[in-house]
């Protein structure tokens, strides 16, 4: 029986797919075929925000936590 939060093959595969798809989208390798125009107010920038969120969350699940980048390792009391 699986424990809650256990990393399974399917979850790791899903995280890898999330990394690959978000990187492809952010690098615009689709050459604009799957792109929301950035000149639309508000909506134009939301797609990059969502793709970045998927990338950061997927990498964090795989063990690379970018949200801790630049933080000091010693705790202040």
Image (spheres, helix red, strand yellow):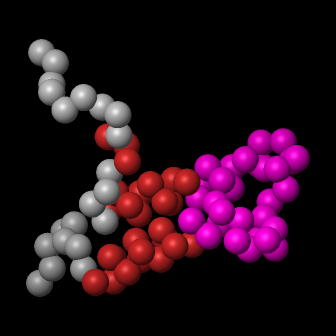
Q: Is residue 76 above or below residue 28?
A: above
Q: Which residue shows up at 23% across the image and 73% down it?
A: 7
- Residue at 15% x, 27% y is 74
* Above or below, comparing residue 42 to residue 11 in the picture: above
Find residue 67 and report its horizontal and vertical position in percent: 37, 43
Q: Residue furthest right?
A: 39
Q: Give the range drawn in magenta.
A: 22-51
Count of residue discs: 0
64 horizontally vs 28: left or right = left
Residue 70, percent from left and from top: 35, 34
Give the answer, above or below, for where 25 lies relative to 67.
below
Whether residue 68 appears in magenta in the rendering, the answer is: no
Residue at position x 19%, y 32% in the image? 73
Is the C terminus in the top left, top right, bottom left or bottom right quadrant? top left
The single residue placed furthest to the top in the displayed view is: 77
Taking the magenta stretch, the answer to whether it contains residue 35 is yes
Eyeballing the image, is 43 above or below 33?
Answer: above
Q: Quadrant of the N terminus?
A: bottom left
| Front-most of residues 1 and 57 | 57
At horizontal 32% and vertical 51% (from top left) the residue drawn is 65
Location of residue 61 by image quarter = bottom left
The x, y position of residue 56, in whole percent, is 44, 54
Q: In this view, does 40 lie to the left or right of 29?
A: right
Residue nearest the viewer, comparing 4 with 75: 75
């Amino acid at each position: 029986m699986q424990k809650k939060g256990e990393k399974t093959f399917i979850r790791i595969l899903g995280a890898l797919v999330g990394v690959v798809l978000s990187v492809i989208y952010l690098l615009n390798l689709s050459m604009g075929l799957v792109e929301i125009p950035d000149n639309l107010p508000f909506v134009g920038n939301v797609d990059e925000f969502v793709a970045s969120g998927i990338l950061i969350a997927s990498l964090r699940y795989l063990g690379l936590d970018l949200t801790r980048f630049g933080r000091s390792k010693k705790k202040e009391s």
